[in-house]
Image: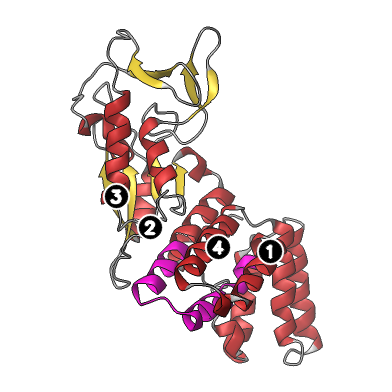
Amino acid sequence: MMHDIPAAPCPSDRIRIGISSCLLGQQVRYDGNHKHDAFITDTLGAVFDFIAVCPEVAIGMGVPRPPIRLTGDVQAPRAVGVQDPALDVTAALTAYGRRMALELDGISGYIFKGKSPSCGLRRVKVYGGGAPSMQGIGLYAREIVQRRPLLPAEEEGRLGDPVLRENFIARVFAYRRWHALLADGFSVGKLVAFHTAHKLSLMAHGTEYYRALGRLVAEAKSQRPAALCEHYGGEFMAALRRPASRKRHTDVLMHVMGYLKTRLDRGDKAELLELIEAYRVGHVPLIVPITLLKHYFRRFPDEYIAKQVYLNPHPAELMLRNGI
């Protein structure tokens, strides 16, 4: 199994994201159309560079082309023509996915076209003797995620959910930071600093992850660097895949407020508590208490909080915390 530790891109470069070509408006669908997604191109395009891939075109099927679908065993389906089952592109799509998993070593995430027999990540129809199963995964997408298990991957349709959208983008930036550490030369000291900077973020995803990774770092000097690197990276990205809940965010906000307890007067504390409670019950988005906390930490700097990724996990212009 590949260890998913490809050469990291230079941190000064814009983040690169793999993406299904049709989502950028490229007319590469089987019928010559596209599936342009304005949020992806207009909003995410301001901060990401997209590496567009259409596996069906890449293997020579052309545009327009006969449509294909998955058939047979859900665990090992074949990609065949809808009208002509003799058209079988299973091997070609699989081989191309394996190749691109290696070639796309500079990307920090991937956005796939949902429901596609080549690119769908989940609930792709697999046809058999009766009603189609909804448990399939596109053959190209399967190879990418199996060989790049740490790489943040999502379907465009799920990015319409504010929580899933924020989670995916946060994972992209976290993945980028992790690979920047690897590119700079892994060491126990750098791992400790990385883990410290992400403590509050891990708490928001689950205290069990926070504790488990903390134990791993505490025992770091007794482990071989390569094994430690692989173990921590895998556990770290797995932890972030679990979306942070409103309750866990509230717990982190209260924890962060604790660093201000000797600095704020009674009125300021009451206002902050009121906003955190308003967030907890769903009356205001996360950005509201976060903004007030950042205001107070500008007035009363704290060295530990200043190092935390939690308050600034991704560019503010994406406004991802305005809807969660």
Closer mark to the observer between disc 1 and disc 3: 3
Q: Residue shown at 59%/51% (left/top)?
A: 163
Closer mark to the observer between disc 3 and disc 2: 3
Closer mark to the observer between disc 4 and disc 1: 4
User: Counting other residues with Cα less than 10 Å from the Cα at mark 2, is it few (<14), some (14-19), or many (20 or more)?
Assistant: many
Q: Residue shown at 34%/60% (left/top)?
A: 6
Residue at numbered disc 2: 108
Q: Is residue 200 magenta?
A: yes
Residue at numbered disc 3: 102
Q: Earlier in the sequence, mark 4 or mark 2?
A: 2
Query: Helix, strand, or loop for circle 3?
Result: helix
Residue at numbered disc 4: 236
Q: Identify residue type, mark 2.
A: Ser
Q: Label 4 to label 1, Cα distance in Å? A: 18 Å
Residue 69 x %, y %: 38, 19
Callout 3–callout 4 Cβ contact below 8 Å = no
Q: Label 3 to label 2, Cα distance in Å? A: 13 Å
Q: Quadrant of residue 119?
A: top left
Q: Quadrant of residue 105?
A: bottom left
> Which region shows up in magenta?
174-202
Q: Earlier in the sequence, mark 1 or mark 3?
A: 3
Q: Identify residue type, mark 1.
A: His
